[in-house]
Amino acid sequence: MVVGCTVLNFLVYKAMTQTSLLQRAKQGDAEAIASVINYLIKDKKIIAKASVKDGCLKIILESTEPIWDLGRKGKMRNKCRTPAA
């Protein structure tokens, strides 16, 4: 928690920071885009890194565990997908 702030002030500050991050991501800020992706995939043990070079956005996804494996019948299967309900 930020020192000297009430809980309400802190929540407002946090909401403003998140809005600012999304705005930066929408404007093409690579660091902001990586932060948004990392937030969305935090439970998958994957880290996103983003950079811009020559006007092109490059996103790299890294994991300490393999995210693809060979399922039954030797077909590639994405282990990150959430099973359909």
Image: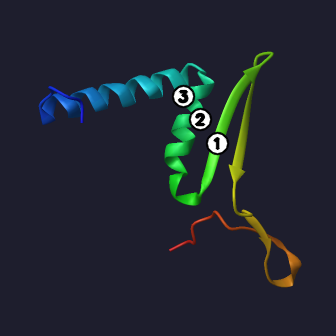
Residue 32, disc:
3
Do callouts 3 and 2 mark residues in contact (Cβ within 8 Å)?
Answer: yes
Q: Secondary structure at mark 1?
A: strand
Proximity of marks 1 and 2: CB atoms separated by less than 8 Å: yes
Q: Residues within 10 Å of mark 3 (few under 14, many from 20)?
A: some
Disc 3 from disc 2: Cα separation: 5 Å
Q: Amino acid at mark 3?
A: Ala
Q: Is residue 82 left or right of residue 8?
A: right
* Above/below status of 78 relative to 39: below
Q: Residue at x 36, y 26 (%)?
A: 17
Eyeballing the image, is 55 above or below 85?
above
Residue marked by disc 2:
34
Name the residue nearer the viewer: 81 or 14: 14
Identify which residue is drawn at 38% across, 31% down. 18
* Residue position for label 1: 48
> Mark 3: which secondary structure?
helix
Q: Residue furthest top?
A: 54
| Cα–Cα span, label 3 and label 1 | 11 Å
